[in-house]
Amino acid sequence: MNISKIFQNNQKWISSKLDQDEQFFDKISKGQNPEILYIGCSDSRVTAEEMMGLQPGEAFVHRNMANMVISIDLNAMTVINYAVDHLKVKHIIVCGHYGCGGIKAAMKSDDLGILNPWLRNIRDVFRLHKTTLSQIEDESKRYDRLVELNVQEQCINLIKTAAVQRASKKWDINIHGWVFDMSSGKLIDLKINYKKIINGIEEIYRIK
Ligand code: CO
């Protein structure tokens, strides 16, 4: 990859944006008001805005290995709190993807050093759903299911946060769990029933 190509690409992108709307950069310079917080994997094949067809200003984005929402991750928690408390987003999306390297690594016993504590959060998801997962004989189908269950658990982790609980009492904030299938390019909605989950776990995780 020739890095100078990126600057040429940038010039082309500026021109194409100005062709569509000559005020484009003036408008986005004034501030942001995104309705969506997107939490996805850092994987280079799973883009955020491009696959969703969104423009600059439409999604606040956080990406990390295996799209995790970990309560003591200052980075993720800062993004979530800012997006909810200040931007007042209406939708929070957790998007996983089939073929996720983080999920695969968590399913193997290799010592990956600094990655171990991160991947252990995925092993915890596996332990929670061990009965379901151990019934799936095909290894790649088992990984796929773990990708989906991990998205579900990260949605639950969002619900555990005080920020989301506060917001859910004030406006109609929604949490969505999706999976990107890179073999077809499709986004799959796991149809996670966030309101039902909140009722089921409120007794344990409620923060007043
Ligand atoms: Co991944």
Image: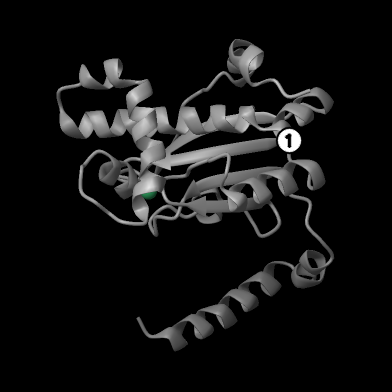
Q: Is residue 189 visible?
A: no
Which residue does the numbered mark 1 point to in the structure image?
163
Residue 137 picture location, percent across and down = 15, 23
Residue 101 picture location, percent across and down = 30, 49
Determine the residue positioned at 84% across, 27% down. Answer: 170
Query: 129 or 72: which is nearer to us?
Result: 72
Determine the residue positioned at 60% across, 13% down. Answer: 196
Q: Is residue 183 left or right of residue 86?
A: left
Q: State the image quarter where residue 134 is shown.
A: top left
Q: Is residue 99 left or right of residue 158?
A: left
The C terminus is located in which quarter?
Answer: top right
Determine the residue positioned at 73% across, 24% down. Answer: 207
The N terminus is located in which quarter?
Answer: bottom left
Residue 130 picture location, percent across and down = 29, 21
Query: 81 or 207: which is nearer to us?
Result: 207
* Mark 1 residue element: helix
Determine the residue positioned at 79% across, 42% down. Answer: 85
Residue 24 picture location, percent across and down = 75, 68
The vertical placement of 2 against 134, above or below, is: below
| Count of picture labels | 1
The vertical placement of 79 against 20, above or below, is: above
Query: 137 or 120: which is nearer to us?
Result: 120
Other-residue count near label 1 (Cα within 10 Å), few / some / many at <14 / 14–19 / ≥20: some
- Residue situated furthest bottom in the rendering: 4
Q: Amino acid at mark 1?
A: Ala
